[in-house]
Amino acid sequence: MVARAVRILATLTLLVIVVAAVAWAAMAIWFDGPHLRVIAAPMAAGLVIVCIILAAIVRPLLRGLTVALFPVIIVALWWTAIPASNARDWTPDVARTARATFHGNSVTIENVRNFKYRSETDYDQRWETRTYDLARIKGVDLFLSFWGPTEIAHTIVSWDFDDGQHLAISIETRKQKGESYSAIRGFFRQYELYYVVADERDLIGLRTNYRGEQVYLYRIRATAPQARALLVDYLEEVNHLADHPEWYNALTQNCTTTIRGHAQNVGVGGNLDWRLLANGHLDELLYERGQIDTSIPFAELRARSNITEKAKAAGDSPDFSARIRQGLPGISG
């Protein structure tokens, strides 16, 4: 009786796995397979049919379900071998890749984006080469930008230097001309991973002033050496991607899970938590862990951390970064 119950449970569990795997494989063929839909559609449908037939004719059922996974494995091997590229017809805002060169405490970064915007799509392109003194890093900040749903946000990390400079890095999808972001496509090999290394007036002002997003800013409780190590780790990945492109993935390689990976690399990453995926609650998680200011209740902290109106008022001002930080908890002048 017990053995039969275990067998039924194992069969049902495997059935769920097989259904999910076949669905994923069919979508992988649809999104990442032949560009012609008249070819991709029958290939995806054929995969599903073959898996169903294998599960139906091979007995016992548990073995049939196992055999039905073989075509999925073949698709997975093909899918993981699809190469990412840096050579596509990119949109102008992601056309160049940054590269960092280290000289002791100094780092020179090529292609720091500092566009001047008139609207989200109308701008003057300004790619700059900037030099930063890593010994002058005094803090690291986290921006949460909401464009609609409050469960999900875009995260941006920015470093604060004691000479007044700020360097922001946003982990995004690298889109080709005529391409737009799709949440579903983000789970497949549709977009390369891209690090936007930029001036805060560019990254933050674009979101608050031209995209109508709500942006929150929090100072991360990290020592200057930790903040420096985090930036170095980021820039080493920037250099790696310039030579070895990788795919963005909405689940495993997105704007927040990648930040956690960098934090783990320098010994400050925390345990996995559901709010790393539903990252609209990331500030709540950081508050619980004591990684942002906890001197006031969280609701008050969040209200005071909304820098949207400050950013709108600052516009293209040279002291943009200082103005958006005025009066923020946990940030001294």
Image (tube, grey):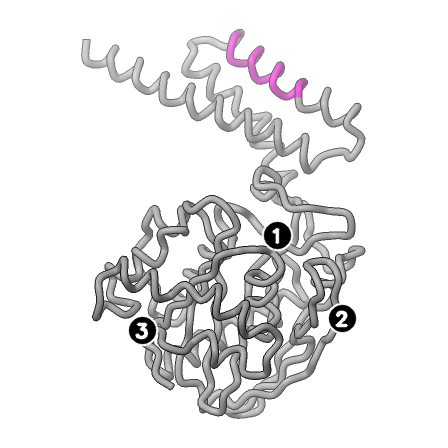
How far separated are the C-alphas under marks 1 and 3? 37 Å
Residue 297 shown in magenta? no
Residue range corresponding to the magenta coloring: 45-56
* Residue 124 numbered tag: 2
Dot 2 amino acid type: Asp
Q: Which residue occupies the foreground of this view, 266 or 132?
A: 132
Which SS does the magenta portion mostly show?
Answer: helix
Which mark is drawn over residue 329? 3
5 vs 283: above or below: above
User: Which of the 4 quarters of the picture holds residue 113?
Assistant: bottom right
Q: Position of residue 251 (x, y in %)?
A: 49, 45
The residue that disc 1 covers is 247
Q: Is residue 11 left or right of residue 86?
A: left
Looking at the rendering, in which quadrant would you find the N terminus?
top left
Determine the residue positioned at 48% across, 49% down.
252
Q: Residue at x 74, y 66 (%)?
A: 123
Q: CA distance from mark 2 to mark 3?
A: 34 Å
Left or right: 47, with 283 as reference point: right
Q: Secondary structure at mark 2?
A: strand
Element carrying mark 1: loop
Asked whether 52 falls inside the magenta stretch, the response is: yes
How packed mark 1 is, by other alpha carbons closer than 10 Å (few <14, some 14-19, many 20 or more), is: many
Report the residue at 34% width, 70% height from top: 267
